[in-house]
Amino acid sequence: APRLILVLGDQLSEGLSALRKADKDRDVVVMAEVTDETGYVPHHPKKIALILSAMRHFAEQLSGDGWTVEYSKLDAEDNSGSIPGELLRRADAHGASEVICTRPGEWRLIEALNDMPLDLTTLADDRFIASLDEFNDWAEGRKELRMEYFYRDMRRKTGLMMEDGEPAGGKWNYDHDNRKPAQSDMLRSAPMSFTPDEITEEVLDLVERRFDNNFGTLRPFNFAVTRGQALRALDHFVKYLLEGFGDYQDAMLTGEPFLNHSLLSPYINLGLLGPLEVCQRVAEAWQDGDAPINAAEGYIRQIIGWREYMRGIYFREGPDYTSRNILRHDRKLPWMYWGGDTKLACMEAAIGQTRDEGYAHHIQRLMVTGNFALLAGIAPEEVHEWYLSVYVDAYEWVEAPNVIGMSQWADGGIIASKPYVSSGNYINKMSDYCKGCHYSVTQKTGEGSCPFNTLYWQFLDRHRQRFEGNHRMGMVFRTWDKMDAEKRRDVLDTAEAFLKRMDEGEVV
Ligand code: FAD
Ligand code: DLZ
């Protein structure tokens, strides 16, 4: 009897371990669009369209290569609505009892597959640079799991930007050069954009019909949906945008949602591009003198460092990770996150482009929407569900450690040695948002002051016991203590009044 080879929506790689294990002449590839996956959070319409279109293109490619593919479309009448359901249905039809899969990127799905009454073989997902065993070996016995040390091991392992066993240029990390604000008169290329073909148009119609109420704008839709297109997007980034990537990595600019970012995470996470091939291209550009060292090193670190590290943490920490809430935050996510009005220019910019593009870059996610949620004490699980929904590149294995760990400090500091919180000053330094804001970033208290300014101190005051002893935070507590008592009272009162207005549904 044939075996069923499961290929999930984010496993669209020709070299997938499950496909490598399969016999083209005997086995049946199963791919399924199912409501369980399209509905576990209210995904951005662009995200659903990207995944379904890329899945359909990949299935077509596999069939063309001689595979037998059983593909379930979302609207098919006999679609059971879940991945295990579709496997059972196909098993019945083909007289199969064995399933081979590559380990899914989410505990929920791993557990659902394990509960299935079929004989399941789960293979490692080796589309990563470090295996999970390798990560666990690295982590074992360490007091602190700092990304920087893991990253150095990955540099040694891959040999990327290494010279005779030493980091190129003599330093591991050039982040110091990567904190320049951007100016609005700078010219830079837009990211690569692709015209939808017939398959994509059909998917767009389907998504429009079925997911019209989800937060996010579906059209225009210009994502790459095949490996060939994704390779062109990589080319475009390396040729036109990489050079300025380092310098402007942390910058934010009104009306410029992409700046010098690569927009490659959706393709790497789907499996259309491999993390190593992307980094090799970037290292070559540096070697050829087409990109400065701070850009190439910074870019490679995000992928072989942060991306791999996040995955290691997700699987190491286990299924309860997404419900951690060490700071006991319980406020509801305000409506502005789902497109409700706000007078905060930075939130409006970050959430507005999230709605339109399904995209915001790292500093917007971390220091605007993430910072606000942490300062305001929003329940981390709600924050997590929002991030998992609204970004085109969001899958739990990478989203959860970024949100629960890095951004909301809800894991108690496994990922971040101190919480990523800042007052309005940081946002003002790195962006032009504050210029056009209803609130004044230079005003520290009272009506009209930037809420980040007062919420920042209120957060520290609220969590004083926990953070006072953190050696990287002692200074800020001393600054707070030096303020006169009346000013401190003013700050806390202004913060309280702001949160109250927000909780009551006022536009803030
Ligand atoms: P670039 O700025 O061009 O960076 C290059 C690549 O580095 C990215 O494509 C990505 O593959 C990798 N990368 C950079 N930072 C990280 C990181 N912290 N973790 C993992 N990979 C990283 N990334 C996701 O892929 N999916 C998510 O759901 C996701 N959620 C996030 C939530 C929060 C709160 C934060 C702070 C970050 C999140 N990130 C997530 C990381 C990062 O913001 C995105 O990878 C990046 O913005 C993607 O855009 P880009 O391809 O233009 O990135
Ligand atoms: C995210 C997603 C969506 C929206 N739809 C599907 C789908 O219909 N079929 C499928 O196989 N996968 C889909 N995915 C991706 C899965 O949710 C993903 O494999 C898991 O979250 C693990 O990363």
Image (cartoon, rainbow, N blue to C red):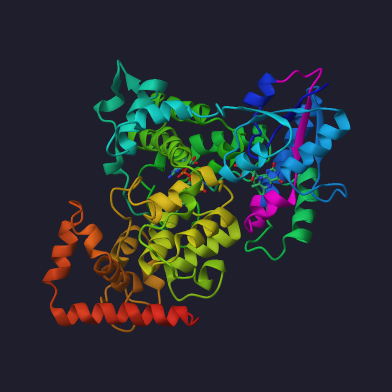
In this picture, is 28 found above or below 388? above
Q: Is residue 63 left or right of residue 255?
A: right
Given residues 179 and 59, the one toward you in this image is 59
Which sits in the foreground, 288 or 219? 219
Q: How many marks?
A: 0
Q: Is residue 171 left or right of residue 34?
A: left
**x, y (%) of residue 501?**
43, 82
Q: Is residue 93 visible?
A: yes
Identify the image quadrant of residue 346: bottom left
Query: Percent from the top left, x then y, of residue 225?
Result: 68, 40
34 is within the stretch colored magenta: yes
Q: Is residue 394 magenta?
A: no
Residue 508 visible to the viewer: no
- Which quadrant would the C terminus be assigned to in this image? bottom left
- Give the image quarter of residue 55: top right
Give residue 194's position: percent from left, percent from top.
67, 44
Residue 192 relative to residue 363: left or right: right
Image coordinates for residue 302, horizontal then vertical, percent: 41, 38
Residue at screen point 40% across, 74% down = 437
Question: Which part of the image, by quadrant, shows the N terminus?
Answer: top right
Please give the range of residues in magenta: 22-47
Task: Identify which residue is drawn at 38% across, 69% down.
Answer: 376
Above or below — where is 146 with respect to 481? above
Residue at (81% x, 49% y) in the render: 202
